[in-house]
Amino acid sequence: MLFLLGTYINKKPLKLITVKKLLLPLLALLFFISCEKESYSDLQMEQQLYDNSPMTLRSPTPKIDVCHYDAENNSWHVINISGNAWPDHQGHGDVRLDDRDGDGYVPNNACDYGQQGDCDDNDAAVNPGAEEVCDNSIDDDCDGDVDEADSDCSTSCVEGEVKIDYNGPLFVAPSDEVFVYTWQLAKDACAAKSEIDGCEWYLPSKDELNALYLARNVIGGFDQSGNYPGSYYWSSTESSFNNAWAQIFGNGLQGDANKQSAGSCRCVRR
Ligand SMILES: [Ca+2]
Ligand SMILES: [Ca+2]
Ligand SMILES: [Ca+2]
Ligand SMILES: [Ca+2]
């Protein structure tokens, strides 16, 4: 650089304006070299610090957000602390907000922080976006209602349906289907009923049908005259290729009947 500068000075008379023109790029160059050296030495220092640092510095404890009470201002604020510091904060009644179970929801908090409402931040299956499971004694969707008390577990598919207990809850339609049917059409009638209300109705099995007969006065609406075909109820249980089981609701007798004969149909669901 100095050599080039010397050559330039020899060829032309040195004027003040020329010196200015030369001085500025020269200073810029020196500044650039100086910054480069500084950054390099910073890097070296950081590298040394990293190499000599204890394990905790190399793998820092994850930071967590906590909702912290500021007594001076009587207000709550989110502060970001080291996970190690959490035990010290517990005594302050702080609320943790780091979504421990990773389900996307944090607990309700006075800081109005994040997607709130996680009533169990140790169980990713429990949060406001979950579906209520109706038999686990847990408020899965965090709406304050557990299992059957939750309207999501409402068991009503049609008005007046009756729940009886036969190998668990068995729900019975409140009335017979409107016609008498051959066996296949009786099965179809329950399938069609499901299409209408979205509930999974089906023609009861032979044993389920007998449970209906035993509870006939609680359920109501059966033809108990004993007359064919209205008092003959189809079950879904086949006895042969051509026959299926039916039950007479006049006397409770079960017998197999030709699938082409007529009978009443009472749909059930689980
Ligand atoms: Ca959570
Ligand atoms: Ca949860
Ligand atoms: Ca539940
Ligand atoms: Ca619930």
Image (spheres, rainbow, N blue to C red):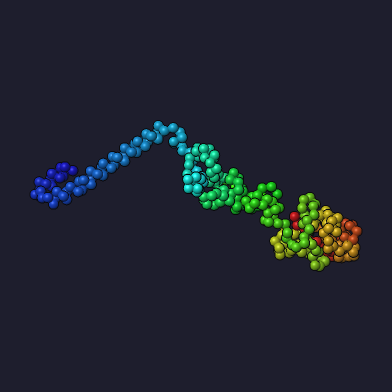
Q: Quadrant of the C terminus?
A: bottom right
Q: Position of residue 225 (x, y in %)?
A: 90, 64
| Residue name at image x 45 percent, y 33 percent | 55
Q: Position of residue 261 (x, y in %)?
A: 85, 64
120 or 54: nearer the viewer: 120
The residue sitting at the left extreme is: 13
Q: Is residue 78 visible?
A: no
| Residue name at image x 60 percent, y 48 percent | 119
| Residue name at image x 83 percent, y 61 percent | 220
Q: Does 33 sit left or right of 183 as displayed? A: left
* Residue 37 sits above or below residue 236 on the image: above
Q: Does 1 sit left or right of 246 as displayed? A: left
Q: Does 94 sit left or right of 50 as displayed? A: right
The residue sitting at the bottom extreme is: 179
Q: Does 102 sit left or right of 177 as displayed? A: left
Q: Is residue 6 visible?
A: yes
**Number of numbered discs on residues:** 0
Q: Position of residue 142 (x, y in %)?
A: 62, 51
* Residue 244 sits above or below residue 15 on the image: below
133 or 107: nearer the viewer: 107
Q: Position of residue 30 (x, y in %)?
A: 23, 43
Quadrant of res 266: bottom right
| Residue name at image x 48 percent, y 38 percent | 61
265 or 137: nearer the viewer: 137
Q: Quadrant of the N terminus?
A: top left
